[in-house]
Image (spheres, rainbow, N blue to C red):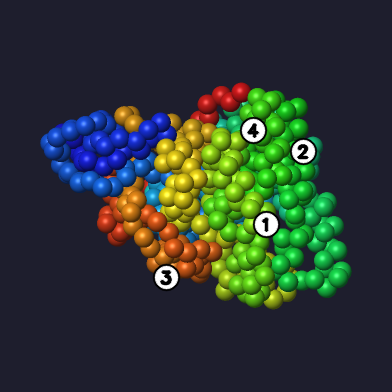
Amino acid sequence: MTDLIVRGGTVVTAAGAAIADVAVEGGRIAAVGPDLGSDAREVVDAAGLLVLPGAVDVHTHVRVASDAEPDRFFQDSVAAAFGGTTTFLAFNNPGTGGSAAAGRTLLDGLRSWRARTEGDAAVDYAVSLVITPQLEDAIAEMAGAIELGVPTFKAFMVYDFGVDDATLYRALAMAGASGGMLQVHCENAVLLEALTARHLEAGETLPRYHATSRPPYVEAEATARAVALARAARAPLYVVHLSCREALDVVRIARAEGRPVFSETCPHYLTLDESRYLLPSEEAAKYVISPPLRAAGQGDALWEGLADGSLALVGTDHVPDRVAVEKRSWRESFDRISNGAPGIETLLTLVYSEGVAAGRISLERMVDLLATTPARLFGMRFKGAVEVGRDADLVLFDPGARRTLRQADLHHTSDYTPYEGRAVVGAVRSVAVRGSWVVRDGAFVGRRGFGRFVERELERLS
Ligand code: MN
Ligand code: MN
């Protein structure tokens, strides 16, 4: 017998939208079509609502639970659910002393991360492994991780856990040869250091200098270098958090040449600008994100890149830092402030409101950007579409709702939202993961540990 029929909603795929019913059996979508009847254990009326595939957020820094903060992973997974995200990717960075640090090799780190997140999430999740100079033989272990269903890796061109060009080249080549993909944080470390030092020597320590210490050319140069390294390594390249038209131009040229270069941007680059850094320091620290927020007008260039296919998808770069904890060093100087801002719960809402409702992208393109393409690029073949055979990860979305985003209404583990007070159109009403309701009419009805680790395998990219 059919487990669930969602009746009469507007089912949206990357290719089109039509009023249809969705039938679910055994956690998977069994049928999509008109009038599937009501012979099911549960029938839910979705008239007037959009039926969307759950968003797949491929860029989050959801923290693993610790003794001091045992609910951190679970609680941010609940926030994901409230926002309509049914699968998220986190990172394991054993090269830093932070959250998930344990084990000095890539595979030890993976085993430890798996153990510490097992049975903790409310929605499905996966992980990418960070390649750092602190790890032993990380590049040699990449093939082993791919065999364990973890085919994506991250490397930084800046920070003390960043890699030099030679290591980046070798990691790209290994990924290319073994069916993996590298996600690269592209900024020029030499320029960033020089510009930071110049500000500090001049006594310029306010958060506003975060933006001027890493201007667009710092990002664009590194993006071009990563493209060249990937080209020589015969590897795909995934550029994380692209923030400006200067870097977008680099990606556009590479794609026009037919290279497998893919890039994401983030909601904050689409909806906020650098004027936030002129706020009083404690407030400005909330927007210390890398790359930084850019000049007004840069967001329009990114929306165009999303609309014309130059940018592949939107990920959040969710960092659940708190002003009162991780970011409290805003008093010292801009280069001491923990980088990042929360966003796991506001992805779909912001892209719908500022993208679809504002007329910048179509509903179908939004579904492609938030679900279908991230699932495909990151090797999750059962995710990302309301289509027979896929997991029944469904979002019932009210396109006409109007509300104001407030920290008080959110569920993430940060203590603020960068979108406080922003009026938005549209609201997530109910969310199912593999056919089970996790959010129902705006209330959490899921359970800790329901979320499963998704083993992934990439399509060959060429
Ligand atoms: Mn980054
Ligand atoms: Mn990040």
**Which quadrant of the view contains residue 29?**
top left
Position in image of residue 83 (x %, y %): 41, 54
Q: CA distance from mark 1 to mark 3?
A: 29 Å
Q: Which residue in the protein does label 3 denote?
A: 408
Are dots 4 and 3 in contact, CB under 8 Å? Answer: no
Name the residue carrying label 1. Answer: 295
Given this view, does label 1 or label 3 mark the residue nearer the observer?
1
Q: Mark on residue 394? A: none
Residue highlighted by disc 4: 261
Amino acid at dot 4: Val
At mark 4, the secondary structure is strand
Mark 3 closeness class: few <14, some 14–19, many ≥20 residues within 10 Å = few
Q: Nearer the viewer, residue 43 or 303?
A: 303
Give how far apart the Cα atoms at labels 4 and 3 are.
Answer: 39 Å
Q: Which residue is mark 2?
A: 225
**Under tag 1, what secondary structure?**
loop
Q: CA distance from mark 2 to mark 1?
A: 24 Å
Seen in the picture, residue 413 relative to 452 is either above or below; the reply is below
